[in-house]
Amino acid sequence: MKLSCPLPKLDFDTINLGHGSGGTLTSQLLDAGVFKLLENDLLNKKHDGAIFNLSGKVALSTDTYVVSPIFFEGGNIGDLSINGTVNDLAMCGASAKYLTLGFVLEEGLKMTEFWEVLLSIKAACDVAGVNIVTGDTKVVERGKGDKIFINTTGIGIMHPKANIDAENIKTGDKVILSGPLARHGITIMSHRQGLQFESTISSDTRPLNKIVLSLLDEFGEKIHFLRDPTRGGLATVLNEIATDARFGIDIIQKNVSVEEEVIGACEMLGLDPLYVANEGLFVTVVDPTVADAVLSRLKEWEYGKMASIVGEITTDHPRQVIMKSLIGGRRVVNMLPGEQLPRIC
Amino acid sequence: MKLSCPLPKLDFDTINLGHGSGGTLTSQLLDAGVFKLLENDLLNKKHDGAIFNLSGKVALSTDTYVVSPIFFEGGNIGDLSINGTVNDLAMCGASAKYLTLGFVLEEGLKMTEFWEVLLSIKAACDVAGVNIVTGDTKVVERGKGDKIFINTTGIGIMHPKANIDAENIKTGDKVILSGPLARHGITIMSHRQGLQFESTISSDTRPLNKIVLSLLDEFGEKIHFLRDPTRGGLATVLNEIATDARFGIDIIQKNVSVEEEVIGACEMLGLDPLYVANEGLFVTVVDPTVADAVLSRLKEWEYGKMASIVGEITTDHPRQVIMKSLIGGRRVVNMLPGEQLPRIC
């Protein structure tokens, strides 16, 4: 593996159980790499907890990342774990500020792999404008974990104009999707299957905080709802929205963007892109008076060229999502019943 | 296993990969058990993040718990994961308020076991006076995890009189230990070795927030430092304090409480109690003018009967911990070099 920054000089080249002991080896591991790489005033204290001032309305979100494989086109478990939590906070209408980082490492993990994950964590923090302020490292025996699991928990400051609540959704509201579906899930799945597609599909992992906060700046309370269709895909998120809002949703399939190569891959793998996980995508339900303006702003964003109004909130068929298909028929879109792609994030 | 509260009626009796999908099975699992058991206004929102008001100085701490076995005398991974994070915050001088809960479940985990862990989480939250406000559930394939790993991340409100910082430690300060050593580590270790001791030793897992906050109420800034000797044990924590404070520490072995049965178990297992993990214990470094009063308060606490002044801060041998042994000799006490007991918490 080619490292984008040299590995610090260490006496070991794989993780062993001692690195989770809380003793000398843990200190060596953290002092040699983690603290230096991620340094900031709060983390530098090296306490069990970080202490800071906060005031006002905040959001708190947690996620544990168990994606397999840990490296994939477009990212790895490191940047995924930062972007994912930054995005969960953005979906609350909050600007991520402080993150915690908890590792469960499997004995035998190569230090080069761990270092590459750390470099991605650092890069993703820089892009999103967040700091890791405290953390924890545990090591489990070979065969009791799978290379690396990462928990990130984030605190974000609520945007003063944010009022993101399913209760705000009303009939006639427009449902907007920020980009094309299914890239992250297809990337992971094709890796696992060892498939080669003609053109490379890469994960869409990225932070969504800046675009979401700029929409809140401009449109405020007219942004009624936000959610990122990760596990379970777009179909699951739309069903959750319909259930929580107690309204129906009408979706027009031709407006749902899916790239050609992703469609091809889905067909080859027997997957419906509506259920495939995404990482750098969001759904927003907005007041109809601002729908076109929101769409314009999304299209100005570098990842929003394929944004579109995919549907509308309706009082017909409450709690149901109905899609008008490409050939004109109408079908109910249910939640993902079981597991389509385990360990996608 | 005898459950202290009946398991909800479910269509499944073990965890499968679908429970981590984010789809219908995840909802079934959460709605049937987790949300109802842990309910509070913030968690009831079922969003990806919890939103609340905070103001002033706060502490943030994270820990992932991978203890094996997950059930042991005196507790299980559930209450351990709540108490551990509540205690990390207490060591910062903060009163834990909101916790996040992240599960990594192994496919095949029995629902009865998961439920028992959840019941302990609930009970521990009630004792400590904290709420779980948001969470995450992931499932990994059989053989890629080990029953259950739990991340908890907590936010606590700083006690207005707290000023816990190694920089405040000065020569002549007294080092106080809140109780007897090594119970948690010996409990776990004897379980793993299948050993039976004559009398039952149980884990000392418990929340320390109330006793610590009451000490801060009374003694304020005279409490210079706090830390709980978990992984790496008392020896490691004393070395960390000596290093951070740039002072030496003199310890008197006869003042360090270890119960008879724990001494016996340590001898049988070949372990030094100074390095064995504790869970419900803390070390505090206090101004000498309040040392006796702090000790009196600790002895009034139900778990503080064996509290004692174990040592003193000195300008001699900076960054070194030196113990006067029972037979009168003096020896350097180093940090735990490798791993004594893997997966102790």
Image: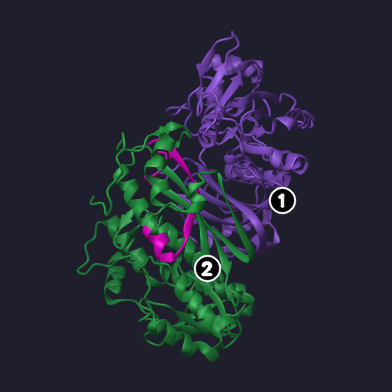
Chain colours: A purple, B green
Q: Which residue occupies the foreground of this view, B270 or B231?
A: B231
Q: Is residue B248 placed above or below A186 in the rendered structure?
A: below
At a point 68% along the width and 29% down the height, the residue shown is A178
Q: Dividing the picture into quarters, in which one does residue A47 lie? A: bottom right
Chain letter of mark 2 equals B
Q: On the rendered image, what quadrant is the C terminus of chain B found in?
A: bottom left
Q: Is residue B282 left or right of residue B320?
A: left
> SS of the residue at dot 1?
loop
Q: Tell me the number on the disc at residue A160.
A: 1
Label drawn at residue B95? 2
Does the magenta segment cover residue B125?
yes
Q: Which of A290 and B74 is in front in this view?
A: A290
Could you say where residue A35 lies in the image, as x and y percent from the top left? 64, 57
> Which x, y percent locates residue A15?
51, 49
Amino acid type of disc 2? Ser
Is label 1 or label 2 in front?
Answer: 1
